[in-house]
Image (tube, rainbow, N blue to C red):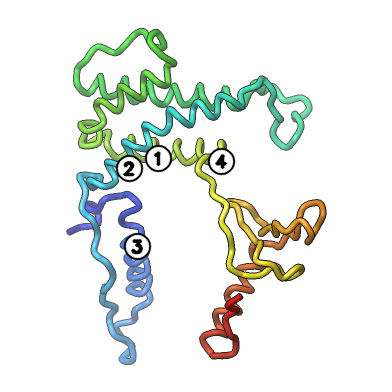
Amino acid sequence: MSEEQACPGTCNRRYREAREAYKKALAAYDPLDADQSRPVYNGPQAWPGDPWCGTCKSRITETLAELDILTGMLAATADGHRTAPGGQRVSGTSIQISPSEAGDDLDELVTMLTGWQDSYCKEMGWTILARRGHLAAPETECINWLMKHSRDILRHPDIARPFGDEILQWHREFKDKTRAGVQTRRLPLRCPKCRFLTLTWTEGEAFVICNNPDCNPYHGARIPLAEYEAEVARMSEALEHGEYEVETA
């Protein structure tokens, strides 16, 4: 199977990484060097798609549905207040800054969704919808319409790939902006200050936090994530060499 037939989704991430490593090894190969053997690809095989595989099609459809939830979460932050880029507006600029960044994001999303709706209607020879936002919010109407036709859209030779890529991209951006689905995990190492098993890390944060109120009356110990990860790596290496015993209490 050629690389063009491989699904472009996350299902083939390991395949793409392995192929890239193979290509670099092949480029570095010198056929005149007797000490070198021609590289052979022994990595994972790709999941085929048309262009998306069945799993990624389902993921894109689910992601499209979740966009409607994320728009509601983002709309809750559209309070009419906005911080200008860099914290202040550049003197003399002619760019008009909207009072609501969240409102701008929602408007751009509706433009993207209606654009795909119109594109598919043109491809099918259908009449482009002239009225939107009559039965529900424009984004809700578009999302439901696109979901109804998603099975055929995701098989369309010209639309499927860019449509899926853009839906996944917008979902990632809205999820980051609303911090939806962010989890806080309890960590196995003891706090270096109070020695209690009270360390947690929230996805996306740069610090590990100690939740023992006696460790710090205000915020608890704050440990840089990179420092914590370095300590985990050090302890793992020590365990491999029998230089450290796991605490059981």
Give how far apart the Cα atoms at labels 4 and 1 are: 16 Å
Residue 231 occupies quadrant = bottom right
C-beta proximity under 8 Å, tags 1 and 2: yes
- Camera-near label (3 vs 2) is 2
Q: Amino acid at mark 2?
A: Arg
- In front of the other: 184 or 3: 184
Q: Report the Cα–Cα distance between label 4 and label 3.
A: 27 Å
The N terminus, quarter of image: bottom left
Say which of 233 and 39 sits in front: 233
Residue 198 picture quarter? bottom right
Mark earlier in primary sequence (1, 2): 2
Q: What is the three-letter code of the residue carrying label 4?
A: Arg
Would you place residue 89 above or below residue 54 in this image?
A: above
Q: Marks 1 and 3, Cα distance to the nearest angstrom?
A: 19 Å
Q: Which mark is residue 14?
A: 3
What residue is at 33 percent from the left and 91 percent from the top?
A: 35
Eye-nearest disc, 4 or 1: 4
* Disc 4 + disc 3, Cβ < 8 Å: no
**Disc on the earlier residue, 4 or 3:** 3
Whole-percent x, y for residue 43 in the image: 28, 70
Circle 2 sits in a helix, a strand or a loop, which is it?
Answer: helix
The residue indicated by pointer 1 is 168
Q: Which residue is mark 4?
A: 179
Secondary structure of the residue carrying numbered label 1: helix
Q: Is residue 182 above or below residue 20?
A: above
Q: CA distance from mark 1 to mark 2?
A: 9 Å
N-terminal of the pair, mark 4 or mark 1, is: 1
Query: Which residue: 54% across, 84% down?
Result: 239
Residue tagged by mark 2?
59
Q: Position of residue 130 (x, y in %)?
A: 34, 8
